């Protein structure tokens, strides 16, 4: 058989009108997945999937089925049917009850929207978890509060993507047996520490950036297997202890001084242009143990993939956000647990196979245009068919979708059950209210709260030692007072487990609400946009002087590289070769 040679094709995005390129490797995957090439650019496609993910915003509302008061990720005015998760995951819920016939006289998206609004959606997605009411997207957890995308963990407060860990507060992606951490970002197997950024196997430390195997280190960067280090300099145990004690980290003033010094200190040392670890033939950033993949960000163990975000263990897949252990996935979000050949889906999981244009399917096979089904096969709009009937009907639907220019496109933006500013899309691709409405989406206004603040943030004690149990009764005004773009709640409370944690770890009380604190950590993650630049290694002709002679000799490196670090950053950006000479 003659091999088909694909050529690159430059297109104009039908949504934002920006040009984008489809490369030969993309065409090979489209052929393998049996889907047509996209008409939207990769960024707009990502937004279109992300608007189906509200990961952190919670609301009080009533269950549309039982009338029970509940906490939900869906606002009270959401046009979809929202139910209590206890009902959703009970035997009382049977999604086939809402089955209907496909109507060939109407477009697929039009009738799917009408159909999907009738099938109950779970107000929260919590599985096998105890004492975890105020959380979203959580499984196998206990005693967690205001967390999301957190699994197999215990005693987590205000965590995002904290997995297989325990006793952590205000952490963004702490994994693999991390414990007793505070305000850490992207840590693996770290313990008893605070303010760690991109660290692995570090303990009893504070204010570290890109350190591995460090113990009792303070305000360091790019260190490996060190102890008793301060600002990258080795000290005796007694000298080190005196330096740390001089900052008085049990006070807010001492912590703020250290944080300011730390951020300035980190910028005096080289940063690698991209984080690509044990990977071959890849493009993107924060890529671990992957190969033959492009346009991928914050991923691990991908093979032959493209345009994938925040996922791991994918093969032969494209255009996904959030998922793991799957293959042949296209234009989907939250596809997990050995699912295969699922296209244009929202949370289709646990060995679901050959499903298209469906929402919230568990262990289903050969389903098209379905919602809320468990352990079903050969269903269309939740109506059961024989194998032969199903295949004939799906062919008819697809033919009609091709005619109507629908097949190959993800669900329209307007079908999202969330307002844009409640979704993860707004976190990574912030749009104005005018743009959101022009694109056919809804913009959510802040809920009016009926509480009155009883304390200003500025009045909080400087030291945790000065805090009494009376703080648990206070409604504290966030120091941002709603003036930021972080979904500021304007006020917050300290809960009992939180106060216990602060006292044990000698941490001063926060002055900002959980949303504002989350966005401060989110800002440490680089944009998912590659830009060109030249390696800044200049052998001492800039802020940083190299410690060893590099391959390019005494002069500047001059190598052309890519990075996701923003152009207005103060960071010194090195190519991988120059960086490795200085750090390893």
Image (cartoon, helix red, strand yellow):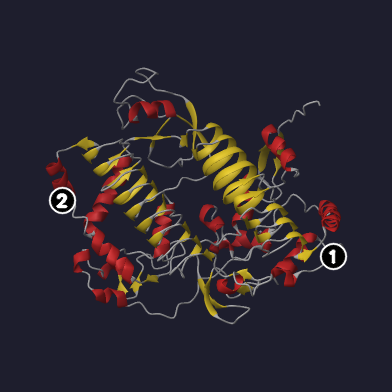
Residue drawn 29% across the image and 36% down it: 225
Q: Secondary structure at mark 2?
A: helix
Structural distance between the alpha carbons of marks 2 and 1: 73 Å
Q: Which mark is residue 103?
A: 1
**Residue 149 x/y as whole percent:** 49, 57
Give the quadrant of the N terminus.
top right
Taking depth in this image into account, of 563 and 35 the one nearest to the observer is: 35
Whether residue 264 is visible to the viewer of this picture, yes or no, is yes
Taking depth in this image into account, of 137 and 487 the one nearest to the observer is: 137
**What is the total number of numbered labels drawn onto the structure image?**
2
**Residue 514 x/y as whole percent:** 40, 64
Residue 124, above or below 153: below
Whether residue 43 is visible to the viewer of this picture, yes or no, is no
Query: Which image quarter: residue 113?
Result: bottom right
User: Which numbered disc flags the more N-terminal residue, 2 or 1?
Assistant: 1
Residue drawn 54% across the image and 36% down it: 290
**Residue 296 x/y as whole percent:** 56, 41
- Give the side of residue 35 with respect to residue 300, left or right: right
Tag 2–tag 1 contact (CB < 8 Å): no
Give the quadrant of the C terminus.
top left
Q: Secondary structure at mark 1?
A: loop
Residue drawn 45% across the image and 68% down it: 130
**Residue 411 x/y as whole percent:** 70, 57
Residue drawn 38% across the image and 40% down it: 570
Query: Which image quarter: residue 171?
Result: bottom left
- Residue identifier under label 2: 246
Task: Mark 2 vs mark 1: give the one in front.
Answer: 1
Q: Residues within 10 Å of mark 2 (few under 14, many from 20)?
A: few
């Amino acid at each position: 058989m003659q091999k088909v040679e694909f050529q690159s094709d430059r297109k104009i995005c039908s949504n934002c009108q920006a040009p984008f390129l489809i490369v030969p490797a993309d065409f090979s995957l489209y052929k393998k997945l049996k889907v047509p090439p996209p008409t939207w650019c990769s960024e707009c496609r990502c937004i279109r999937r992300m608007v189906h993910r509200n990961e952190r915003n919670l609301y009080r509302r009533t269950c549309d089925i039982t009338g029970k008061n509940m906490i939900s990720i869906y606002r009270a005015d959401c046009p979809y049917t929202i139910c209590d998760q206890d009902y959703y995951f009970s035997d009382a819920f049977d999604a086939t009850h809402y089955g209907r016939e496909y109507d060939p006289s109407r477009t697929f998206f039009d009738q799917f929207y009408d159909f999907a609004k009738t099938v109950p959606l779970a107000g929260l997605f919590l599985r096998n978890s105890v004492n975890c009411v105020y959380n979203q997207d959580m499984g196998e957890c206990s005693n967690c509060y205001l967390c999301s995308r957190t699994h197999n963990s215990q005693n987590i407060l205000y965590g995002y993507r904290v997995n297989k860990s325990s006793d952590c507060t205000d952490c963004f992606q702490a994994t693999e047996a991390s414990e007793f951490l505070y305000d850490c970002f992207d840590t693996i197997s770290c313990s008893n520490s605070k303010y760690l950024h991109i660290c692995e196997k570090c303990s009893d430390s504070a204010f570290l950036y890109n350190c591995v195997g460090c113990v009792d280190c303070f305000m360091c960067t790019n260190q490996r297997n060190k102890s008793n280090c301060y600002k990258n300099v080795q000290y005796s145990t007694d000298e080190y202890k005196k330096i740390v004690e001089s900052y008085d980290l049990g006070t807010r003033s001492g912590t703020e001084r250290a944080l300011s010094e730390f951020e300035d200190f980190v910028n005096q040392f080289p940063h690698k242009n991209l984080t690509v670890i044990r990977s071959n033939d890849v493009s993107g950033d924060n890529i671990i143990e992957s190969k033959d993949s492009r346009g991928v960000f914050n991923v691990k163990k991908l093979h032959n993939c493209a345009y994938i975000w925040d996922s791991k263990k994918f093969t032969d897949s494209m255009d996904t956000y959030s998922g793991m252990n799957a293959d042949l996935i296209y234009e989907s979000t939250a596809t997990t647990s050995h699912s295969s050949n699922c296209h244009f889906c929202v949370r289709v999981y646990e060995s679901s196979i050959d499903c298209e244009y469906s929402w919230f399917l568990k262990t289903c096979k050969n389903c098209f245009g379905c919602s809320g089904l468990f352990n079903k096969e050969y269903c269309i709009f939740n109506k059961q068919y024989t194998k032969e009937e199903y295949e004939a009907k799906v062919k008819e639907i697809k033919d009609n979708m091709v005619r109507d220019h629908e097949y190959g496109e993800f669900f329209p933006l307007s079908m999202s059950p969330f307002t844009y500013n409640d979704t993860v899309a707004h976190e990574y691709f912030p749009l104005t209210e005018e743009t959101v409405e022009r694109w056919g989406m809804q913009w959510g206004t802040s809920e009016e709260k009926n509480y009155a603040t009883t304390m200003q943030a500025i009045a909080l004690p400087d030291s945790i030692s000065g805090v009494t149990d009376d703080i648990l009764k206070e409604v504290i005004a966030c120091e941002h007072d709603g003036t930021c773009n972080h979904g500021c709640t304007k006020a917050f409370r300290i809960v009992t487990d939180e106060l216990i944690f602060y006292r044990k770890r000698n941490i001063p009380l926060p002055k900002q609400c959980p949303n504002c604190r989350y966005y401060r950590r989110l800002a440490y993650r680089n944009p998912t946009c590659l830009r060109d630049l030249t390696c800044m290694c200049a052998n001492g002709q800039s802020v940083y002087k190299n410690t060893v002679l590099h391959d390019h000799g005494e002069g500047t490196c001059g190598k052309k590289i890519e990075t996701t670090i923003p152009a207005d950053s103060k960071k010194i950006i090195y190519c991988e070769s120059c960086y490795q000479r200085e750090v390893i």
